Amino acid sequence: MANHKSALKRIRQSEKRRIHNKYYHKTTRNAIAKLRTATEKAPAVESLPKVVSMIDKLAKKNIIHSNKAANLKSKLTKFVNSL
């Protein structure tokens, strides 16, 4: 266990950020999965910009790597275009 006041605060902050990041990462993963299961083009085209925006926000906050974000966006765009 931490012995310093600052270390205790760091533990509290880390846990709070971990839960926050986990929520946004999971929400984005669910949105990606929903987009990948789309069978019609119109709703997929409509939801693609929202999902891409979510991915960009994760990359900006270093929740996911920027290269992974680029790969996800590319694959999703190709999928939507192929519908």
Image (cartoon, grey):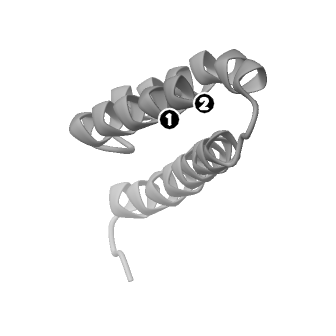
Return the residue nearer the eye: 43 or 3: 43
Looking at the rendered structure, which numbered label has been put on residue 64? none
Disc 2 is placed on an element classified as loop
In the figure, is residue 44 to the left or right of 24?
Answer: right
Residue 33, given in percent of the width and then of the height, sits at 63, 50
Dividing the picture into quadrants, the one containing residue 59 is top left
Q: Nearer the viewer, mark 1 or mark 2?
A: 2
Residue 53, given in percent of the width and then of the height, sits at 53, 20
Dividing the picture into quadrants, the one containing residue 4 is bottom left
Residue plotted at (35% across, 44% down):
64
Residue type at numbered disc 1: Phe
Q: Residues within 10 Å of mark 2 (few under 14, many from 20)?
A: few
In the picture of the structure, the residue carrying the numbered disc 2 is 83
Q: Residues within 10 Å of mark 1 (few under 14, many from 20)?
A: some
Extreme residue toward the bottom, this view: 1
In the figure, is residue 82 to the left or right of 61?
Answer: right
In 3D space, how far apart are the residues under numbered discs 1 and 2 (Cα atoms)? 7 Å
Return the residue nearer the eye: 9 or 24: 24
Residue 68, given in percent of the width and then of the height, sits at 29, 42
Please identify the quadrant where the C terminus is shown: top right
Residue type at numbered disc 2: Leu
Return the residue nearer the eye: 23 or 71: 71
Residue plotted at (30% across, 31% down):
70
Dividing the picture into quadrants, the one containing residue 73 is top left
In the picture of the structure, the residue carrying the numbered disc 1 is 79
Examine the rendered structure and indicate whether residue 69 appears above or below residue 37.
above
